[in-house]
Image (tube, grey):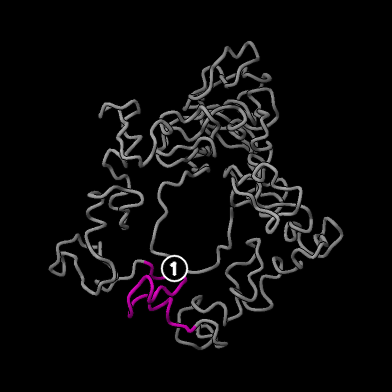
Amino acid sequence: MTTEGSSGGSSGSSSQGESSAAMTTSTTGSSTTVEPTGGTSTSDPSTGTSGPTTDPSTGTGTESSSGTSGSSGDTSGDTTTGGPVCVAGEVNCDCVNDSCVGQAVCVAGKCLPTGDGSCFSEFDFYCDEPEFCPVGSDPFDCCASAQDSICEEFDYGGACPPFSDFFDCGYCLFENDGECDAPDLCPDGTDVADCCATPQNGVCEEQSQGGMCPDGSDTYDCGGCPFEFDGFCDVPFDCPEGTDLNDCCATPQDGVCEEMQAGGACPDGSDPYDCGVCPYENDGFCDVPFDCPGGTDLDDCCATPQNGVCEEMQAGGLCPDGTDPYDCGACPYENDGFCDVPDFCPGGTDLDDCCATPQNGVCEEMQAGGECQDGTDPYDCGVCPYENDFECGGPDLCPEGTDLNDCP
């Protein structure tokens, strides 16, 4: 579920082991590629490793096969999939030398449709239209209905892009990423290696220790820590006792610098607070005194927030521009889907997000004859922005009759 992103500063802590259901894009030369991301996943979605493979000429089965396509995406001519015949290089078809024709990008040998670039969160497996992105700008994520038990991908006879409805099509894009993604992100019976062991039950179930599960799939119970050297002590929640020694060496905020450069026994950089260092300088938030010691984070802590005086240099003050937005009449959180006035932004800003009166029973969006931007009054317009996020959002966050998949 998406929560207000404008509160607080850097917390100084990390959340470990979250599966990331998203795709990242990269551009090389004239071709653009998109790769699924899921921690350290090594599975290639184009191979459909978790679903049964059938001869594509039969027009049946639950996994696509496209001639000579593979991770390289080098194909030519027409190709046959589990669905209709299509021309290589066109949307939903095989790539040609890692490239596609028209408004599409190549991912794992398939040409996936893209929007006009106005949606910042394409390929995150969440339909952001119309709440966060303009209609038509998130075509990959908004085609299929998530987890409705109907496989709507093109390769299986549907109309939606490959990989966009993997749950209903019976496979998992995030296999072998070190996290068990079934049944929340992936359907039951998939992600077998990651879901083999019972986490933190005190028994190492990996094959090298006489168990039945692949090595590396039960790190905690087998005495390993995948998060060492990340700058945070991950014991005991994400790593077992006796691991993550560098990050857990120093006692945080005890007033003693325990790093070697100060004569201590801990690696340099492992006790920043007590050694007078702020890892979060210039992040737009004053992190003193909770996450950084006094005398650090000077730019972010220069201005006194919400005191009615703009203390930035552009207004004759002493603080760097951009460090006192509230008092200088700016809102860093405009158009984020939430009205941030008056808690995080001053009056007269964040106009689009604050146009409608929330939950007053009247849809005030333009598409209903109102004066507010479409997507700014979702509750009163019968829309739930939090559908298919695996948490029941209503009735406080979503109107009745929405978020059906998440709310039993």
Query: Any magenta on residue 43?
Result: no
Specify the segment rendered in magenta. 280-304
Residue matched to label 1: 283
Asked whether, in this view, residue 166 is left or right of residue 377, the answer is left
Magenta region, main secondary structure:
loop
Asked whether, in this view, residue 130 is left or right of residue 277, the answer is right
Front residue of this view, candidates 361 and 356:
361
Q: Secondary structure at mark 1?
A: loop
Front residue of this view, candidates 307 and 118:
307
Residue pictured at 60% horizontal, 72% vertical: 331
Residue pictured at 76% horizontal, 66% vertical: 356
Seen in the picture, residue 207 relative to 133 is either above or below; the reply is above
Residue pictured at 16% horizontal, 67% vertical: 261
> In the rendering, at what x and y percent does residue 405 appear?
67, 41
Asked whether, in this view, residue 398 is left or right of residue 8, the answer is right
Front residue of this view, candidates 151 and 114:
151
Seen in the picture, residue 377 relative to 184 is either above or below; the reply is below
Q: Residue furthest left?
A: 263
* Quadrant of the drawing holding the C terminus: top right
> In the rendering, at what x and y percent does residue 143 appear?
69, 37
Q: Residues within 10 Å of mark 1 (few under 14, many from 20)?
A: some
- The three-letter amino acid code for the residue at tag 1 is Asp
Residue pictured at 35% horizontal, 49% vertical: 238
> In the rendering, at what x and y percent does residue 56 appear?
60, 14
> In the rendering, at what x and y percent does residue 35 appear?
49, 38
Seen in the picture, residue 205 relative to 343 is either above or below; the reply is above
Give the number of marks: 1
Tell me the quarter of the picture where residue 406 sits: top right
Query: Any magenta on residue 291?
Result: yes
